[in-house]
Amino acid sequence: MRPTAAWAGLCATAVLVTAGAVTIATAGGDPEAQRPAAADSGFARDMSVHHQQAVEMSFIVRDRTKDEEVRRLAYDIANTQANQRGMMLGWLDMWGEPKSTPDKPMTWMGMPADGVGDGSLMPGMATRTDLEKLRKANGRAAEVLYLQLMTAHHKGGVHMAQACEQKCTVDVEKTLAGDMVAGQNSEIQLMADMLKERGATAERGATAEG
């Protein structure tokens, strides 16, 4: 099977897994039994946007490198975050909450984000320029840039998830936030090791030696 066809299969699988995950999470955790606070719906909206970019970056790097370690990580991130995004969007539908509002991102945290411009809406998110560089990179350069961008992305995601652990009121969502913190912190460490193997660090333009 050609790589493009394999990746298309992954996209289709992710959609099916996401749909199933929404059903499972809804039935098991019963988020409808608890009315959401502003933090619950705010986190679901913002993290859905945040996750979508992680999925996009993972799709991009999958076609920019043949390194199986990076491709495997990209697969895991795309699959996990598409799954989680599906859950959160499903909860917003269940709660009758809009998927977007005129509020600035992270308003529910008490720290409205102005972004850094160029399409970066929240701390840690890549800019349009970053994404274009990733699309044009190949091999090791693509691997390093992806790992650096995703490390920053995960750090921003962990910050939001920790805020949800403190502020959200729906039990199943607080549990999901805790899972995000644990999972993404683990991947941050993994990516640090992968960057070191490639003579780089999480800081853009830096090397493993500093």
Image (tube, rainbow, N blue to C red):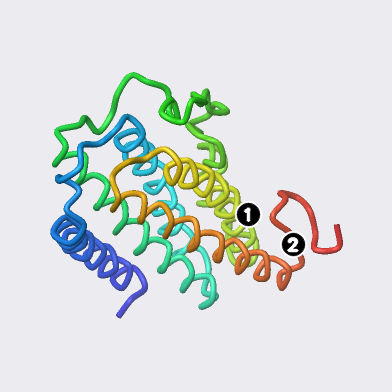
Nearer the N terminus, badge 2 or badge 1?
1
- Residue 4, percent across and down? 33, 68
Asked if disc 2 and disc 1 are in contact, CB closer than 8 Å, the reply is: yes
SS type, badge 1: helix
Q: Residue at x 57, y 49 (%)?
A: 155
Q: Residue at x 42, y 42 (%)?
A: 164
Q: To which residue does mark 1 refer?
A: 148
Q: In this view, does 92 lie to the left or right of 65?
A: left
Q: Residue at x 31, y 49 (%)?
A: 173
Which quadrant does the N terminus fall into? bottom left
Outermost right residue: 209
Q: What residue type is labelled 2?
A: Ala
- Residue 190, percent across and down? 60, 69
- Residue 161, compared with residue 143, is above or below; it is above
* Distance CA(mark 2)–CA(mark 1): 9 Å
Q: To which residue does mark 2 refer?
A: 200
Q: Residue at x 46, y 31 (%)?
A: 109
Which quadrant does the C terminus fall into? bottom right
